[in-house]
Amino acid sequence: MALPFYPLVFMNLLFAATTLCLARPSRAAAAATVAAAVLWIFGNGPLEGQVLWEFDATHGLTVSDLLSVAAVAIAVWTFSTTGDRPSARRTGRRRRTPFRTRY
């Protein structure tokens, strides 16, 4: 009964990190997504699915490994599109929000 618990936790971590990476793109979110993808590769045991490509008798590319490939692709895209933007702290200006408008 407890066998799929940890793989499900790793899968939820992967989905949460990838969602954060897409919702609020930043380099920290991209790094968290890559870390979650690596954890998923090593912790997806009972949830692996069918083997798509065999490397040898004990190793191969499975269906669930493709989730990590997609997450790393999203993280690379996020990392490349969130260049070195100047933040509000470095420029000395306050960031405007809809609740803090000046008239």
Image (cartoon, grey):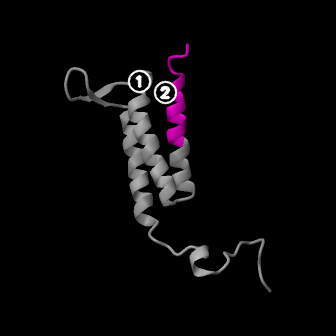
Query: What kind of element bears circle 1?
Result: helix
User: In the orientation shown, which residue stands out farthest toward the right?
Assistant: 103
Sequence-wise, the earlier of marks 1 and 2 is: 2
Magenta stretch: residue 13 in it?
yes
Residue visible at 78% across and 71% down in the picture: 99
- Give how far apart the Cα atoms at labels 1 and 2 are: 7 Å
Residue that carries the numbered disc 2 in the rendered image: 7
Q: Relative to the observer, which residue lies in front, 93 or 103? A: 93
The residue where tag 1 is placed is: 45
The image quadrant of residue 77 is bottom left
Quadrant of the drawing holding the N terminus: top right
Q: What's the residue at 78%, 83% (across, down)?
A: 102
Residue 46, given in percent of the width and then of the height, sits at 43, 21
Q: Where's residue 6, x and y in %? A: 52, 26
State the residue lying farthest toward the top.
1
Identify the residue shown where x is 36% and y is 35%.
65
Query: Closest to the observer: 33 or 23?
Result: 33
Count neighbours of disc 1 (C-alpha within 10 A) and say few if under 14, some if 14 to 19, many if 20 or more. some
Q: Nearer the viewer, residue 27 or 77?
A: 27
Q: Amino acid at mark 2?
A: Pro
13 vs 93, left or right, is left
| Residue 81, percent from left and from top | 43, 65
Magenta: main secondary structure equals helix
The magenta-colored residue range is 1-15
Q: Amino acid at mark 1?
A: Gly
